[in-house]
Image (tube, coloured by chain):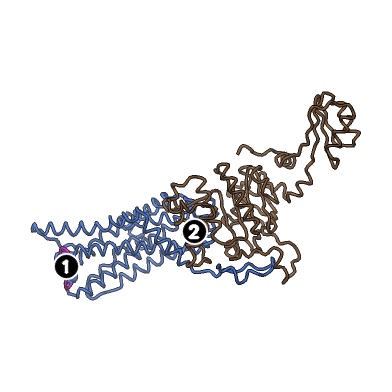
Amino acid sequence: MTLSVPTSGARSAAPVPTDPLVIETAGLTKRFRGGQIAVNRIDLAVPKGAVYGFLGPNGSGKTTTIRMLLGLVFATEGTISMLGRKIPAEAGRALPWVGSLVEGPAFHPYLSGRVNLARLDAADLTASRRNSSVRVDRALERVGLSAAAGKRYRNYSLGMRQRLGIAAALLQPRKLLILDEPTNGLDPQGTREVRHLVGELSRDGITVFVSSHLLSEVEQVCTHVGVMRTGSLVWQGSMADLGSQQKVRVVVETADSAAAKGVLADLGLADIAEESGVASAVLGSRPPEQVVAALVAGGVRVRGFAVAKPNLEDIFVQLTGEGFDVSG
Amino acid sequence: MSAAEPEAVAGPSERLPVRRPALGGRLLGNEIRLLMRRRRNQLILVALAAIPVIIGVAVKATTNSGSSADGLIGSITNNGIFVSFTALVVVIPIFLPMAVSVVVGETIAGEAGAGTLRYLLAVPVGRTRLLVIKFLAVAFWCLLIATTVAVAGLVIGFALFPAGDVTLLSGTQTTLLGGLGRLLLVVGYAGLMMLALATAGLFISTLTEVPLAAMAASLGVAIAMQVLVAVPQLHALRPWLISNYFLDFGDVLRDPLLFGGLTHGALAAVAYIAIFFSLAWARFTSKDITS
């Protein structure tokens, strides 16, 4: 069974002018009845093969955007193209290739996990009746629910429910996975599992679009990020772009902060800051050990020395002028 | 193994391979199975089956003590098949509409309330197709409840009373087979009437995410129509109320068999179905699914 996600080998036939975008929106806007704007003219660009972290605090319009991508909510303005198909007009062509988890799992409580999946499988008009049970069992196995497949959904723990939701998203071979807060309600172990699964799927060539209000969760797996704030997409790009914006600083702890400031200035470092006991500057391309040597040679009594890389959180505070809800 | 394979090898600019879609018969089967395994629905069927049993036993008990009745109930002692006819007349005004409301309220609103609607639509099923499948499942239910009452009536009727040639209300006789044919006609008519009511309920079910509200509203509509039909001053309204036609199958029990009343009622039902299905479709296909 192939997943039909050609990356490099299969390009010979038709030359491709540009790397295609798996999700592309233009001026996408949703104004709900009552005039409240949930999503305000966003232009998403999700390249093929990316793990795209869709970030933003709760209520910033992430879920509404995802619902529009899936054809559940109709856009007020703007266009959506997903896997080369217009949404919602051609949703029937695109969605069989899209697995999704939207605002948490939802299943019939009095049916078992297996029967619930079989129902979704039956709903898929492109899925053959013949292999239904094979598909269901394989999806259950992939998320480690085989043992609990016969239990009623209502008796599942939160983590098991989430995993069943992911199993539903993996019933068919997919080209794109849209996961809305996939680790909500999971314990640290479950969160790691989901992260692992996302990495695995991405290696299989599947594009993953994952929303989260937790930065730390996304930081480790994403190749691209988009940041939402009150309905607008305030930043979007690859992690590499983001890295180039990172300003690594050296921080010197010393009683001679004034002298340290002088040494840092002599080295030609930029953006020097000094307060009593601490001096810091942007490192630039200079190796940190040179800075230490210069400090010592300059007679600065160094108590502590650190190379501080800003984390995603700091960058976003910088980018958006607003902090994130990190508590979760 | 999947249908994806044949066209899947083109470059990244390829059109998505088209998986050949089916009509949705599998989902309809699944839907009906879901309907039938629901404990509540099973209980409804048992309760409905109990009604002809109660009628049969009551008639048997009272005729033994010497009293006799006229009309439909009176015919029961001559032929067991009349237990079915009588039971249908009893259940059609209220009990069947109740059974219909409970199930039809769940259709769209139940899926919306449980959150399963968004996943069904994202599969994707297609909104129109999902609505058609829900409609067909409800149609199955309507026919099933009418059939349940008729069959239970036959079983208890033939157990307690004679079978054989059927003496119709007009006094003429027909064979037992002819009688069963007429019963089938009544069951079909009752099912169609219930489907007309159910389609209104289907529309209501697209308006809310609370299945209980949809059930209550559907039943409320059914009862309100009964009340309106019963008020003589509102005579002018009657032709517009579907419940006005519920019991218009009296001709089936007379000779010769006239289809005038049946056809008139059936046309009214078809009009109801067409109007409310259109409304449900217009609503459901344009609605933001935020549940």
Q: Which residue is mark 2?
A: A137
Label 1 residue SS: loop
Q: Residues within 10 Å of mark 2 (few under 14, many from 20)?
A: some
Quadrant of the frame with the N terminus of chain B: bottom right
Where is residue B144, by image quadrant? bottom left
Find the magenta span and give its range: B159-165
Farthest-out residue, left: B66
Determine the residue positioned at 35% across, 68% down.
B266
Q: Specify whether A241 is left or right of A98.
A: right
**What numbered label is drawn on residue B79?**
1
Q: Nearer the viewer, residue A145 or B122?
A: A145
Label 2 residue SS: helix
Farthest-out residue, right: A266
Q: Amino acid at mark 2?
A: Asp
Q: Which chain is blue?
A: B
Q: Specify whether A273 is left or right of B284.
A: right
Where is residue B44, by image quadrant? bottom left
Q: Residues within 10 Å of mark 1 (few under 14, many from 20)?
A: many
Q: Amino acid at mark 1?
A: Asn
Q: Specify whether B171 is left or right of B261.
A: left
Q: Which chain is brown?
A: A
Give how far across and how far down residue A166 sits, in percent.
55, 53
